[in-house]
Image (cartoon, rainbow, N blue to C red):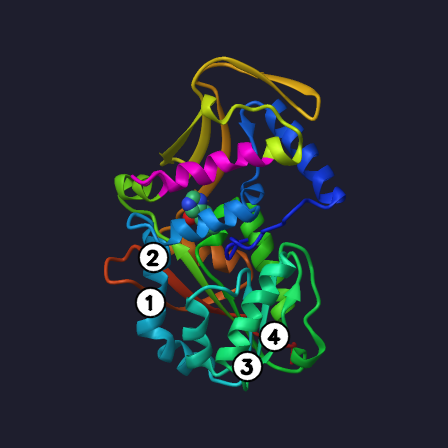
Amino acid sequence: MPAHAAHALKRLPSSAEDLFRTEVFAGLSARPRALSPRWFYDRRGSELFEAITALPEYYLTRAEYDILLRHAPEIARITGSGRALIELGSGSSVKTPLLLNALAPRAYVPIDISGDFLHQSAAALAKRFPALSIHPLIADFMNPFTLPGPVRSLPRVGYFAGSTIGNMTVPVAVEFLRATARTLGEDAFLLIGIDRIKDAKRLIAAYDDTQGVTAQFNLNLIHRINRDLRGTMPARAFRHVALWNDYEARIEMHLEAVHDLEFTVDGESFSISEGETIHTESSLKYGPREARTLLRAGGWSPIAEWTDPEGLFALLLASSPSPPALPP
Ligand code: AVI
């Protein structure tokens, strides 16, 4: 995931295609209809996501970069140098070198599900940091994974950028944080970007930009279904919708049918009425207290946080709790 823009699978291997088909069939048959945002990231989707991060309305990436630019040395003073830096998700981001410079890690482990993408970005970083020991790891960080041998003896700091945690439901986010705490072990730190709740207009603009890039990103899911699952969904019959669900504290993206239509996916027939939507993504936003509560529920102790000057986005640093004290 972009952290995730990284799921650039060229063609789906058959097991991935089976999973995609199963999820699309289930998601289109469910009420309300919903598809997982992880399917956004084919090659085109990853390119579109990169374009989104540069949009004037999409403040998240710039705000996180700005926070790192100003506070990376302070982060390094807390964590100390010489740790292994474990980046969960894409290591391609322009933010990574800021952290590598400040933290001076003994090793860097970028973890991503897409091997192509991972090796490309690791090679680029190796050129820039020739003395750094880099161990790219192809893994889905949502499932348990083992760290490469050379970093097992080093204390660790994890980095989960971009508010990708916002694309998880709260129970999934808690499970992810707990699994990360287990993987990073004792005496670890976690640095995590979390987007803040703010004015609904500002949030909606970030997910419904004037150039229509986010709309293309959302509609690309239809092109992907048509290509990978022999679908006949007419993309022109859907429009991109981004809305703020205040009760759930999340931006939702939907694909809304502009007229009644029927289509097939891998020979299976579906129909959808005008105005019905397919929910394609939720991006949860957190207030300062809720973000800290989330980290605590996930087994981490928040110890510091920084925001950009407008307070749009937060970068939180948490430590792994010390092992329970033994009774005397
Ligand atoms: C990857 N993720 C954190 C992005 C977000 O903001 O939820 C994905 C995205 N969707 C639309 N624009 C960006």
Residue 83's disc is 3
Residue 186's disc is 4
Give the residue drawn at x 68%, y 44%: 12
Disc 2 element: strand
Circle 4/circle 1 CB separation < 8 Å: no
Q: Amino acid at mark 2?
A: Phe
Q: How many marks?
A: 4
Image location of residue 312, percent across then percent down: 30, 54
Image location of residue 149, percent across then percent down: 71, 77
Left or right, 44 with respect to 285, comes to right
Q: Is residue 101 above or below residue 109?
A: below
Disc 3 element: loop
Among the two numbered marks 4 and 1 on one chain, the one whose residue lies closer to the N terminus: 1
Q: Nearer the viewer, residue 55 or 280?
A: 55
The crowding category of the residue bearing disc 1, from other C-alpha atoms within 10 Å (few below 14, some 14 to 19, many at least 20), is many
Can I make out residue 91 in this image? yes
Among the two numbered marks 3 and 4 on one chain, the one whose residue lies closer to the N terminus: 3
Residue 270's disc is none
User: Which of the two marks, 4 or 1, is nearer to us in this view?
Assistant: 1
Among the two numbered marks 1 and 2 on one chain, the one whose residue lies closer to the N terminus: 1
Residue 313's disc is 2
Left or right, 91 with respect to 269, comes to left
Q: Is residue 190 above or below residue 201?
A: below
Circle 3/circle 2 CB separation < 8 Å: no
Q: Magenta stretch: give its range.
A: 207-224
The crowding category of the residue bearing disc 2, from other C-alpha atoms within 10 Å (few below 14, some 14 to 19, many at least 20), is many
